[in-house]
Every structure is written in structure tokens, then in C-alpha cells.
């Protein structure tokens, strides 16, 4: 990628274009949907759509912000600002990625650029906002590090408040030659930040001072996963006591018990995303995204390679997962998915098939049904509702 000037880096239309005005007409009845993309092919940044929850349909996409590789995004709790990583390695001619902030107009969905700062490492992969809407956390996959920032009153990001550079490697020489921070997750009580590290098979744990965005290593400072499993993403159960951690390389999910007082994780069990007895010498299967439905009764996950969405039932007594359903995701690389606010639909973005696929969800049984509806967009990765 060529060096990016500040002006082109944050190119956002200075007025609300016709496409966004049309989308805004029915905003009161529909949710705003933002899609972050890779921009090496046809996409150019962050796209806006409106979601019809009654029909399970997306409106035509409109380019809302031109910014390079905004592959993960997060919105503040008041839905007034959106922040994204820029998964690059040459911010301002250096070797790091970037983090960009945008003011969000809830009436039109239009994004207005605020500022862009250094991510503190190459190839950032994930971004999170704390529950107070005052802190931002970024995991740098290529750089093997994490950075924290304050959100100023005007929505702009401060410089780095905390930065931790990891060292070491895992047993897989091809995938774990170095640390690879992949995800930042804020605990339900906003007291801790958990960082999945695929390269070291660890989940780093920090105490958070939400007033300053300062992170302090917990004691103990991390949880150790199975060697070579590659912890990628995690999500908390609504009860705040159970954690489901997606293992990318293991194509599996770990159930971990969370001690909210001490900030510690304890291993409980593992389930596979793949069919029993499945083997392949030609397809590499890796776990991608994971989510718990709002009721806490079902867990959803995607597997890249053979392209699957997998559904599990949650034992409400102990958090253990029981397999319910496994079905094609719509493409080989379902890197991200999300449940819509109504809980009746699931949207899957496939990075290589260049589509977003819609599944209907039974809120009671948790099962998914293909709708046949797909939407073309170049390299969709992250999908968020606002």
C-alpha cells in the first residue's frame, strides 16, 4: 500500500450524499448497520445500510467513510461515535497500524471524521470501547501488542495511555512465531480487559481504570490456553460468570469460568466446531467469530475453511455447550457474524466470497434457517448495529 496522506486517510464527504439521505428516510423504523471492509479490492471503507427487522433485509449499501482496511469497528454506548482500526502497517510512513474515530449522526447515519492515531503496532485486528464510553482498546495482531486510549469530550482519541508489547512464541512455528494479540474484551463490570493472544496461547488480563484508560497487569497476569490452540476471540455469558473463548487454530470453543473479584479464568471444557471424525488434507479449518444470544441459552460460532455456522445450546446450570446445528455459512471465509437487535436474524460476512448472508433465527430453539438472501459487497468483515 502506498503512503497515505492525512487528507486522503480520513476522506469523508463534507455533506450528506443522496444515497445517505435516501437511507435516512426510514431510519426511525430501521436500525443503522455499518460494515467494515478490506479495501485492497473493490471496497473503499465503511459502508452504511438500514436493516428491516420485520423482513430481515438490508437496504442498498452506501459508502459512508473512505478509510483503509477498517476491518473491525466499535460504537460508543450512546451511539454517538464510531471507532475503527485500520489494518495497515505503514501509518504516516511508519511500521504501525492506525485507529480512526468518527462522529455518528443518529438521524442519517453519516460519519464525520474526528481524528486518527497510531495503533502502537502493525496490523491491528480488533477494537473495543468500554461500557462507560470513555476508553478504547486496540489489539495489534502483527505487532503483538495492545494499546489503550481515552475518548475526549469531543469524541477524539487521545494518544496512547497504556501500551504493552508481548514477547515469545508458541509451539506452531508457522502461526505462532511471535505474539499475535487478536481481541480485546471488557469485563461486564468494566473492571478488567481481557486480551486474546493467538501467538502465545494466552489470554492476558488487565485491571482497568476507566477514568484514565490506564491498564495494569492483573495478578496473575494471564490465563494459559492449550498449546497450539490459538485463542482468537471471546465473549461473556450474560450472567457474567462464564466465558466462551474461540480457538482459531484449534477450531474449537473453550468454556472458562470467570472470577470477577480476582480477575481470573479457570478451564472447564472444550467443544469442536467440526463434525465428528472430520479430516481434510486440503482444507485448513480455523475458528473465527463467537457470540452468545441475549437470553444466554445459545452460542453461535463460525468456522473458516469449509465455511460453517455452528449452533450450541447452553446448559443453564453449568454453562456447558451441547451441539445443536451445523450448516453452510454461505462462503468459505465467514470471518464475522452478528445477531440483529431483535434476535430473530443472524448476518454473516464472508471475506473472500464478497457477500453478506442472512439467516432466520428461532429465538426459542436457537436454530437457524437459510433465507436465500445474500448481499454483494467487497471483502466484508465487521458488521455492527447502531
Image: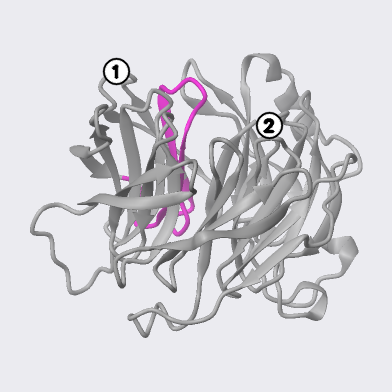
Residue 108 in view here: yes
| Residue 193 rendering spot, x and y as whole percentages | 57, 51
Q: Name the residue under label 1.
A: 364
Nearer to the camera, 105 or 233:
233
Looking at the image, which residue is at 43% across and 26% down? 294
Left or right: residue 343 compared with residue 50: left
Say which quadrant the N terminus sits in: bottom right
SS for callout 2: loop
Residue at which label 2 appears: 77
Q: Is residue 315 above or below residue 115?
A: above
Tell me if residue 21 is in the magenta stretch.
no
Secondary structure type for disc 1: loop
Highlighted magenta segment, given as a residue range = 329-355
* Residue drawn at the location 38% of the way across and 83% of the way down: 174
Picture quarter containing residue 147?
bottom right
In this image, 137 relative to 106: left or right?
A: left
The first of marks 2 and 1 along the sequence is 2
Question: Residue 17: horizontal and vertical position, in percent?
Answer: 83, 36
221 on left or right of 98: left
Whether residue 44 is visible? no
Is residue 186 found left or right of 46 in the rendered image? left
At horizontal 73% and vertical 42% (from top left) the residue drawn is 82
Residue 334 is one of the magenta-drawn residues: yes
Residue 332, image x and y in percent? Answer: 34, 57
**Residue 254 x %, y %:** 30, 51
- The quarter of the picture where the C terminus appears is top right
Amino acid at each position: 500500500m502506498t503512503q497515505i496522506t492525512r487528507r486522503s486517510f480520513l476522506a469523508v464527504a463534507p455533506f450528506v450524499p443522496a444515497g445517505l439521505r435516501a437511507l435516512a428516510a426510514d431510519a426511525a423504523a430501521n436500525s443503522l448497520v455499518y460494515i467494515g471492509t478490506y479495501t485492497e479490492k473493490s471496497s473503499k471503507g465503511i459502508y452504511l445500510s438500514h436493516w428491516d427487522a420485520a423482513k430481515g433485509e438490508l437496504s442498498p449499501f452506501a459508502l459512508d467513510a473512505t478509510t483503509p482496511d477498517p476491518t473491525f469497528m466499535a460504537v460508543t454506548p450512546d451511539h454517538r461515535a464510531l471507532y475503527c482500526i485500520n489494518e495497515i502497517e505503514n501509518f504516516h510512513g511508519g511500521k504501525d497500524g492506525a485507529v480512526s474515530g468518527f462522529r455518528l449522526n443518529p438521524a442519517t447515519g453519516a460519519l464525520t471524521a474526528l481524528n486518527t492515531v497510531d495503533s502502537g503496532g502493525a496490523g491491528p485486528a480488533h477494537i473495543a470501547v468500554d461500557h462507560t464510553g470513555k476508553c478504547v482498546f486496540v489489539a495489534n495482531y502483527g505487532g503483538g501488542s495492545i494499546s489503550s486510549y481515552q475518548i475526549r469530550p469531543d469524541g477524539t482519541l487521545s494518544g496512547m495511555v497504556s501500551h504493552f508489547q508481548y514477547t515469545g512464541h508458541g509451539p506452531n512455528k508457522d502461526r505462532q512465531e511471535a505474539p499475535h494479540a487478536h481481541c480485546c474484551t471488557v469485563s461486564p463490570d468494566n473492571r478488567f480487559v481481557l486480551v486474546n493472544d493467538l501467538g502465545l496461547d494466552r489470554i492476558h488480563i488487565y485491571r482497568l481504570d476507566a477514568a484514565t484508560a490506564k491498564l495494569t497487569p492483573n495478578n496473575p497476569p494471564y490465563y494459559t490456553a492449550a498449546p497450539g490452540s490459538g485463542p482468537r476471540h471471546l465473549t461473556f455469558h450474560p450472567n457474567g460468570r462464564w466465558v466462551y473463548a474461540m480457538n482459531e487454530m484449534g477450531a474449537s470453543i473453550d468454556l472458562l469460568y470467570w472470577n470477577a473479584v480476582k480477575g481470573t479464568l479457570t478451564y472447564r471444557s472444550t467443544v469442536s466446531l467440526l463434525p465428528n471424525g472430520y479430516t481434510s488434507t486440503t482444507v485448513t479449518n480455523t475458528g473465527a467469530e463467537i457470540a452468545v444470544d441475549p437470553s444466554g441459552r445459545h452460542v453461535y460460532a463460525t468456522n473458516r475453511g469449509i465455511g460453517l455456522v455452528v449452533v450450541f445450546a447452553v446448559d443453564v446450570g453449568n454453562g456447558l455447550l451441547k451441539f445443536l446445528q451445523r450448516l453452510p455459512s454461505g462462503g468459505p471465509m465467514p470471518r464475522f457474524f452478528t445477531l440483529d437487535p431483535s434476535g430473530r436474524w443472524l448476518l454473516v460476512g464472508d471475506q473472500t466470497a464478497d457477500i453478506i448472508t442472512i439467516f432466520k433465527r428461532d429465538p426459542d430453539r436457537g436454530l437457524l434457517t437459510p433465507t436465500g438472501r445474500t448481499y454483494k459487497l467487497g471483502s466484508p468483515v465487521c458488521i455492527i448495529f447502531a
